Image (cartoon, rainbow, N blue to C red):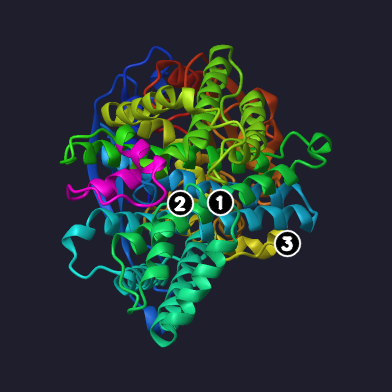
Amino acid sequence: MSQSNTHLILVVHGIGEQSCGETVDQVVAGAMAKHPARPASDYADAPISVQSSHLCLTEKDFSKPPDDSVEDVFTCQTYSLEPAGDTQQRAVFAEVHWSDMSPAPKGAIATILDLLKLILGLGYVAMDNVENTKSHLFHRGLVHLFNWVFYGGIAVLNAMLLVGTVLLLGQNYLPGAGYFTVIALNAGAGVALWLYLAHLEKEHPRFLVTVFRRGVIVWSACVVALLALSLVAGNAVKAGFQSVFAALPDTLTSQSKGCAALFDAFALDSSPLDFGIESISCFVELNIFAMGVFWLFAALLVVISLVGFAKTPRRVIYPSVCGAMLMFWSVFTTGFWLALRQVLDQFDRAHDNCGELGDTLAQAGSLLPLNDNGATAYGLLCLHMEQAVGTLAISVAFMILTLFAAILAYTFGQRVIVNLWVRAILVVFPVALVLILVLSGDITGNSVHGNPFSPLKSVSLIIALGSALFIYNFNETVAAALGVARDVIVYLVRAECKWTATPAERESNYPRRALIEARFERVFRFIVNALNPQRITVISHSQGTVVAARTLKRLLPDLLHSKPELARSVHLITMGSPISHIYEEYFPENYPIKRAGLSKDLIWHNLYRDRDYVGQTIQTTGIPPENDLAVGPGGHSHYFTDKRVWTLMWKTVGFRLFTDPPGT
């Protein structure tokens, strides 16, 4: 078979929603379809035999160290096409599949969790953007400090608040669940979470997960220290708590119910510290207060990063990314607590609604011994949620403005991803958030003129719940919309901090990117050696164009040395490519993708749609202007089965299945 004229066609998919083989299926179907532009010289009217198979390859060539010697395996779907009566012509399609590293969620719950991971993953985008566009260490330090506050503080407190809420709601069913039990259970939960994350990071280290894990262990250490002090010097802990609580201003203690009850219990009781609902509720209240402080600090960091922002180039987006993290996290977490409250409504045996219970507790100086089981705990949950009305209202309002600006941008043919108006809205949000956290009483629990956002509570709750229902009913649409961001984030996941490193030093800091590109290299080298083709065409879409270009930059010099004729017969075709529109624009130091840097002999054509919100022209790569081809109107998906794409492929690009490409 090595004597035949073999054309190797590598297909690299984009958004991680495709199942294995789906992308190459579409390309083969488009290439074999009867098309008026397909020349007869390419056996357009002759029967073609098709054989489908797949390869199973190891991720690497057993290059792991001896203590971790087992390699994972991935599948490569292939097709072999031969025209009837001509055994010397053959086109072999092979797919580079990596969507298992960026899988699309299935179902509403998975989509919501994917949204959460997307929000959390934006921290990588902010870090890479500031490192690629701002050389001053002050700005880099601000973004990294923001991530430590967000992941090591806000995210940790949310997780522990959930633990405290479970204890709060189940205190009637946990005999002896008092002060010591609360501290021990929460410390145990923190340590267990830390151990689980440490286990996950052994094989796939992720820097932001490391930050979260360290925040968990710091929080757990503080709780363990409190437990030890309580056991050794219980009376001293009592006295210290009483002194601190009594010294706090009324603006901080007026909304406290659990800590106020614990303060009263400490004053009246000299027995060992064993208080149930009081200690649990105080623990929850302390988490809520600490989270408000972290929110304020994180928002202030973003505001500080805006100093000199007007003088920075257009490509600086990290303040907007940090603002988006705060905004979407606020809406997401509030939606979670709203959903939890709706579920608890079904089990409210006091037959009182949340508002009535919250008002009852708000008017009391401390906890009221409501008779019905769970009513006090449920009322406390309602009361704590009231303190977040301002944050919820402003977050929902800015989320609507952001979506509206994105829709307008798409309607008028402007950029949707990192659109200028979208970025402006996200930059203003942290400034507004700082004011809201203070004026609405989210931090102090008490505003000067009452909570000014109370009238907006119902509207905000409806919108938040409506967003959750939309995700539930249209989860596939939402998952597809999140796909592009998901793939970019997967590509930017870093193993370590390295915030002062040079671009060359940071190159080895992206394990997921290295693993994806290693798959391309494995498929490329294996099939080239197995088939000895006469020419190679790489057809790629979206994120796959970045994968293909970066990997070819490493492979082509070696190929030129070993197979010089084949190296001069490589054709790269990119579709809907974010190389210039996203990577060159916002991460220029990490992604200097230039045609001259790949190979002076490389033929490179780029196809894009007018309203593709990801891929547009890629003139920054240095390809000839006549090779940058507009397909016409349309979005980002379904390039491979677009008739207009194949018209350009046959007539302008010069793609041929079985004949030599033009100019060779």
Residue 315, how many percent across, how many down?
71, 37
Q: Secondary structure at mark 2?
A: loop
- The picture quadrant where one finds residue 572 is top right
- Between 651 and 192, which is closer to the camera in this rendering? 192
Q: Secondary structure at mark 1?
A: helix
- Decide: is 525 above or below 421: below
370 part of magenta stretch:
yes
405 part of magenta stretch:
no
Residue 81, how many percent across, how many down?
29, 37
Residue 66, how many percent across, how many down?
40, 84
- Decide: is 401 above or below 128: above
Looking at numbered disc 2 in the image, what kind of residue is underneath it? Answer: Ser
- Decide: is 61 above or below 326: below
- The picture quadrant where one finds residue 644 is top left
Please name the residue that numbered disc 2 is placed on: 256
> Is residue 620 toward the left or the right of residue 153 in the image?
right
- Decide: is 231 above or below 333: below
Question: Which label sits on residue 502?
Answer: 3
- Upstream in the sequence, badge 3 or badge 2? 2
Looking at numbered disc 3 in the image, what kind of residue is underneath it? Answer: Thr
Mark 2 and mark 1: Cα distance apart in space: 8 Å
| Number of residues whose C-alpha sits closer than 10 Å to that of mark 3, classed few (under 14), some (14–19) or many (20 or more) | few
Looking at numbered disc 1 in the image, what kind of residue is underneath it? Answer: Leu
> Is residue 253 toward the left or the right of residue 35 in the image?
right
Please name the residue that numbered disc 1 is placed on: 252
Q: Which region is colored magenta?
A: 357-381
- What residue appears at the point 67 percent right and 41 percent down from the top-left corner? 319
Determine if residue 322 is in view: yes
- Would you say the residues marked 3 and 2 are in contact, meaning their CB atoms lie under 8 Å apart? no
Circle nearer the viewer, 3 or 1: 1
- Between 46 and 647, which is closer to the camera in this rendering? 647
Residue 577, how many percent across, how many down?
55, 34
